[in-house]
């Protein structure tokens, strides 16, 4: 029973981290039709910025996290505006190659600038302890991760469905020519969505630093996991990504607790089964 | 490639730009054989590198059949390579050390895995297919890690000694026999692949690549054709894996890894997909670059290949050649 609850809590936290990183990729892949395999590198950049700001510059955790997320967003916006927007009309394979190349360069630069060792983000005392929920105590960091995941899901769904920005984004995706003729600033919308996706990846990298250690190869190591979440959840579907991330997170955590010598077998078997059952995403028929 | 080619292209090949090549199928393999033998003669202290190049070329050739000819983007091709390698290694260790029989076992294992997984994978298209190929290769990797008794787990499979080739030629320390053996298998399979691509079957597969719905409407059994193509590509990838196991006398977990699949795709795009010769050029350039840059610093290597990838996309090789030709023309 105790193991079961631990698996559930850890799996939920792991799933939330996967979701926060994956949601940005889901939006660029599903709505903007841009295959961005450098998304893992954005998560890495966010995590590294937070680690360096708190450890080297001695910033407070609560100040360093927004700063790191903002820095990732700026990097995403700059890359989008300078290079990536020229690739929107290219085919999938070229986008894949370019963004993989970009990840390689970011990995090599990270290693050259910071070094190959694992980066820790020191937690403030409020998060390092544990919280008593009455029936059991939980690490405060896990609770923060789960709460942040829920907040991101709600905020993202609300933005896309309810706000003016969401309307413009969907219009720009459906028919960019008409949207542009109606006076919607398409370039701004695309750039802002891309930057928001990058910022969320950065946030995921920070939140998940305890579960997914930050090192230069981070960008490629966890890319497959994130792609799996996006594929199983269905491209462009925020709710689908959430369900897929939590489901796969719990399965991966359970197999680590109960059958660690099988590696990631159950994770990928689950993914293959889910994809074969619903090739267009869990929540789409 | 024009998508406006009328369906009658199949009936009247020589008249059209997209018609099958007129060069005889043996020409490119013969050139490859001569170049390979010359390289072996000129670089007698680099047999290890040459063997690796031949094996990598064979693997990328198999990937080109799937990606370039069949139009199925896959990131799980290492599964077929690794299966061939493990099958050949286990066969040599447990049954008998003859290299040619081992090669056949590797080919059969690669083809069998491709046939089995292809029957499931090929029902899906595009991004779903891509992700499912990753899943298949990762499942195999986990299984190989689990079955330590057979595969040696993370330590790798080793301890097998290959018998003499054809009963006469021992594998020497220098690697001369290994390099020539790999070259011979490569040339033979390259010839067969060339014949396959230019055959009516190859034309049907290329038609499916260009327009699946139209080929289905013309009466081509789309799934059966793609399944056969995938199985044959699996056989070639299995051969490459078996060669790698036999010439290195060790099989590691990395022969099933995601990184190998991704690297092979990079090599293919670097050389140009869909023409078979592109696989030769891309794999050779990439392996030589890797050999030189990685000996300096592995991260250095990553920087080089990353920059190269971005450059290839921004300035495609075809455009660069056209630009160079125009410049050369202007000078003359």
Image (tube, helix red, strand yellow):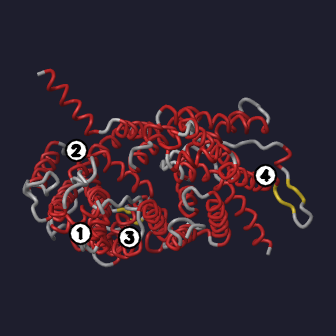
Q: Are marks 3 and 2 on the same chain?
A: yes
Disc 1 + disc 2, Cβ < 8 Å: no
Report the side of A204 relative to A218 (left or right). Answer: right
Name the subunit of mark 4: A
Q: Are marks 2 and 4 on the same chain?
A: no
Q: Nearer the viewer, mark 1 or mark 4?
A: 4
Q: Nearer the viewer, mark 3 or mark 2?
A: 3
Residue to which mark 4 is pinned: A144
SS at circle 1: helix
Mark 1 to mark 2: distance in Å? 23 Å
Looking at the image, which residue is at 60% across and 53% down? A22
Q: Are marks 1 and 2 on the same chain?
A: yes
Mark 3 to mark 2: distance in Å? 44 Å
Q: Position of residue A59 (x, y in %)?
A: 77, 32
Instruction: Tell me the tag on residue B99.
Output: 1
Q: Position of residue B268 (x, y in %)?
A: 31, 50
Q: Quadrant of the C terminus of chain B?
A: top left
Q: Nearer the viewer, residue B30 or B314?
A: B314
């Amino acid at each position: 029973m105790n193991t079961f609850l631990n698996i559930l809590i850890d799996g939920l936290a792991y799933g939330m981290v996967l979701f926060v990183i994956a949601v940005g990729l889901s939006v660029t892949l599903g709505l903007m039709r841009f295959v961005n395999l450098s998304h893992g590198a954005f998560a890495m950049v966010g995590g590294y910025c937070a680690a360096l700001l708190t450890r080297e510059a001695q910033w407070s955790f609560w100040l360093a996290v927004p700063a790191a997320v903002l820095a990732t967003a700026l990097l995403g916006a700059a890359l989008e505006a300078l290079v990536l927007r020229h690739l929107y009309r290219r085919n999938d394979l070229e986008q894949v190659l370019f963004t993989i190349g970009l990840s390689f360069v970011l990995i090599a630069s990270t290693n050259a600038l910071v070094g190959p060792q694992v980066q820790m983000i020191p937690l403030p005392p409020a998060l390092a302890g544990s919280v008593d929920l009455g029936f059991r105590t939980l690490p405060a960091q896990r609770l923060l991760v789960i709460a942040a995941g829920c907040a991101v899901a709600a905020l993202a769904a609300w933005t896309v469905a309810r706000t003016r920005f969401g309307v413009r984004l969907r219009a720009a995706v459906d028919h960019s020519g008409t949207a542009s003729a109606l006076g919607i600033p398409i370039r701004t919308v695309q750039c802002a969505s891309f930057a928001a996706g990058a910022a969320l990846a950065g946030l995921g990298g920070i939140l998940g630093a305890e579960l997914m250690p930050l090192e230069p190869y981070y960008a490629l190591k966890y890319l497959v996991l994130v792609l799996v979440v996006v594929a199983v959840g269905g491209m462009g579907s925020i709710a689908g990504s959430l369900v897929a991330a939590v489901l796969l997170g719990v399965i991966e955590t359970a197999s680590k607790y109960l059958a660690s010598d099988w590696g990631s077998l159950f994770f990928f078997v689950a993914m293959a089964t889910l994809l074969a059952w619903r090739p267009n995403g869990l929540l789409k028929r | 490639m024009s998508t406006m080619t009328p369906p009658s292209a199949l009936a009247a090949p020589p008249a059209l730009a997209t018609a099958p090549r007129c060069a005889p199928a043996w020409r490119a393999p013969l050139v490859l054989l001569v170049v390979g033998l010359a390289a072996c003669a000129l670089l007698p202290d680099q047999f290890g590198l040459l063997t690796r190049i031949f094996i990598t070329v064979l693997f990328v050739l198999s990937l080109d059949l799937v990606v370039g000819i069949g139009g199925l983007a896959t990131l799980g091709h290492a599964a077929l390579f690794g299966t061939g390698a493990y099958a050949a290694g286990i066969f040599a260790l447990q049954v008998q050390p003859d290299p040619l029989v081992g090669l056949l076992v590797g080919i059969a294992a690669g083809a069998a895995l491709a046939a089995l997984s292809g029957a499931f994978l090929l029902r899906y298209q595009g991004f779903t297919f891509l992700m499912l190929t990753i899943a298949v290769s990762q499942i195999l990797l986990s299984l190989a890690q689990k079955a330590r008794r057979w595969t040696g787990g993370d330590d790798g499979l080793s301890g097998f000694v290959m018998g003499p080739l054809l009963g006469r030629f021992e594998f020497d320390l220098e690697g001369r026999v290994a390099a020539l053996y790999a070259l011979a298998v490569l040339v033979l399979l390259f010839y067969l692949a060339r014949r396959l691509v230019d055959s009516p079957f190859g034309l049907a597969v290329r038609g499916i690549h260009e327009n699946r719905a139209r080929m289905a409407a013309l009466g081509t059994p789309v799934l059966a054709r793609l399944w056969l193509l995938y199985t044959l590509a699996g056989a070639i990838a299995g051969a490459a894996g078996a060669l790698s196991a036999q010439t290195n006398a060790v099989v590691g977990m990395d022969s099933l890894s995601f990184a190998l699949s991704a690297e092979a795709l990079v090599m293919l795009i670097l050389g140009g997909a869909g023409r078979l010769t592109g696989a030769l050029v891309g794999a050779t350039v990439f392996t030589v670059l890797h050999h030189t840059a990685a000996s300096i610093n592995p991260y250095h290597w990553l920087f080089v290949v990353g920059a190269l990838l971005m450059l290839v996309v921004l300035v495609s090789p075809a455009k660069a050649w056209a630009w160079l030709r125009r410049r050369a023309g202007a000078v003359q």
